[in-house]
Image (tube, rainbow, N blue to C red):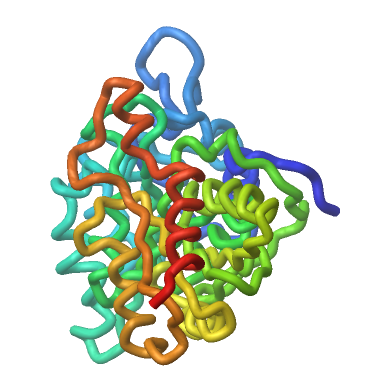
């Protein structure tokens, strides 16, 4: 039975279900329960966003572990536990903190399967928050997922709906390889849709065609999917129909669906909240330029923030984030291209 849930509720339900079905699943991170040793209630916070609240009272302190403030220890412990038969879900509170624990991901977890002849499995999920729009300033607002997509051996998930968040999280926990799960912090309560009560999975590398259209393909990720939908609604009033593709996972990337859409529309706009240099917009643009060039009727357009740190001032942060108006402008440019 489907109910309307927020992304926050959908993720929480996924955690309860995967821990119920498999006792090898553990969670660890900073204050994912909270309150231990302080006046007041144990399980006081459930993480900085309250998503893991209720898990420790249900599954105990041996499976839901509050850790010291040490990202290198959290990720290192999770990777080690995964190689020893557990299925850890580690919380790296903000992806901006990757700098102090990247070796555990880049040179250890990502490479074990390849270094040991395919015999080593590292079934670890690393949850982390991304994105601007929360007035969290330059060190808590970045979209660094392209850095992880660059590394072979890691699967990268970027959900854009509550339905996808639950199905992709359960798939991630059941996967035998390292998975980085990027959650846009603004979307926890901003996005709500129908979510089945029972557990289900969504395969990695299978894009979602969010909207059909024949004039222009828009590829967007995470919160940008919803900005693209607003742009498409406005453009439709002028007779311009856009097909919106949400890749869901950027590694593996569903290249076929993107190329087939561009073959149909002849135009491509890629919307990416990550910094513009070497981001997913440039990667997907290169893919289409190389393999779908003959189908293009106009130059590819990319919509990304400026190449500057995310501003703290609300007015500047608002100006930093790609807008529906900016996306619509890019689509009009491709549709109006005269050659």
Location of residue 59 by image quarter: top right
User: How many callouts does the rendering have?
Assistant: 0
| Horizontal and vertical percent position of residue 82 | 35, 64
- Can residue 142 be seen from the camera position used here? yes
* Residue extending farthest top: 39
- Tell me, yes or no, if residue 20 can be seen here: no
Residue 94 picture location, percent across and down: 31, 40
User: Image height check: is 213 above or below 73?
Assistant: below
Q: In the picture, which quadrant includes the N terminus?
A: bottom right
| Frontmost residue, 64 versus 5 | 5
Residue found at x 25% / y 91%: 117
Q: Is residue 43 above or below residue 106?
A: above
Question: Residue 151 at x, y = what percent?
Answer: 23, 71
Looking at the rendered image, the quarter that the C terminus falls into is bottom left
Point 65% across, 64% down: residue: 241
Q: Residue at x 51, y 29 (%)?
A: 50
Left or right of 14, for residue 308: left
Quadrant in which residue 271 is drawn: bottom left
Q: Nearer the viewer, residue 201 or 322?
A: 322
> Which residue of the protein is positioned furthest toward the right in this rendering?
1
Residue 136 placement, left or right of 332: left
- Return the residue nearer the eye: 173 or 283: 283
């Amino acid at each position: 039975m489907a109910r309307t849930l927020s992304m926050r509720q959908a993720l929480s339900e996924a955690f309860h279900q995967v821990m119920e079905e498999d006792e090898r699943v553990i969670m660890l991170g900073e204050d994912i329960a909270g309150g231990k040793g302080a006046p007041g209630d144990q399980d006081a916070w459930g993480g900085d966003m309250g998503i893991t609240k209720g898990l420790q009272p249900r599954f105990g302190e041996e499976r839901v572990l509050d850790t010291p403030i040490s990202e290198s220890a959290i990720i290192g412990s999770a990777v080690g536990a995964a190689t020893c038969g557990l299925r850890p879900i580690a919380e790296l509170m903000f992806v901006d903190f990757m700098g102090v624990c990247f070796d555990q991901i880049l040179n250890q977890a990502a490479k074990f399967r390849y270094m040991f002849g395919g015999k080593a499995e590292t079934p670890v999920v690393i949850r982390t928050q991304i994105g601007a729009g929360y007035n969290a300033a330059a060190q808590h607002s970045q979209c660094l997922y392209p850095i992880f997509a660059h590394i072979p051996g890691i699967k990268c998930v970027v959900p854009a709906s509550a339905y996808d968040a639950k199905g992709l999280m359960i798939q991630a926990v059941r996967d035998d390889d390292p998975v980085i799960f990027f959650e846009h912090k603004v979307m926890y309560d901003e996005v709500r849709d129908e979510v089945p009560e029972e557990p289900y999975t969504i395969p990695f590398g299978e894009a979602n065609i969010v909207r059909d259209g024949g004039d222009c393909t828009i590829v967007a990720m995470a919160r940008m999917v919803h900005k693209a939908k607003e742009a498409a609604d406005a453009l439709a009033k002028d007779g311009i129909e856009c097909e919106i593709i949400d890749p869901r996972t950027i590694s593996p990337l569903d290249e076929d669906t993107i190329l087939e859409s561009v073959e149909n529309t002849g135009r491509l706009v890629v919307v990416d909240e990550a910094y513009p240099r070497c981001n997913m917009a440039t990667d997907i643009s290169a893919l289409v330029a190389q393999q779908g060039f003959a189908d293009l009727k106009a130059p590819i357009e990319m919509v990304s923030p400026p190449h500057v740190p995310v501003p703290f001032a609300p007015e500047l942060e608002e100006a930093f984030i790609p807008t529906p108006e900016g996306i619509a402008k890019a689509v009009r440019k491709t549709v109006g291209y005269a050659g």
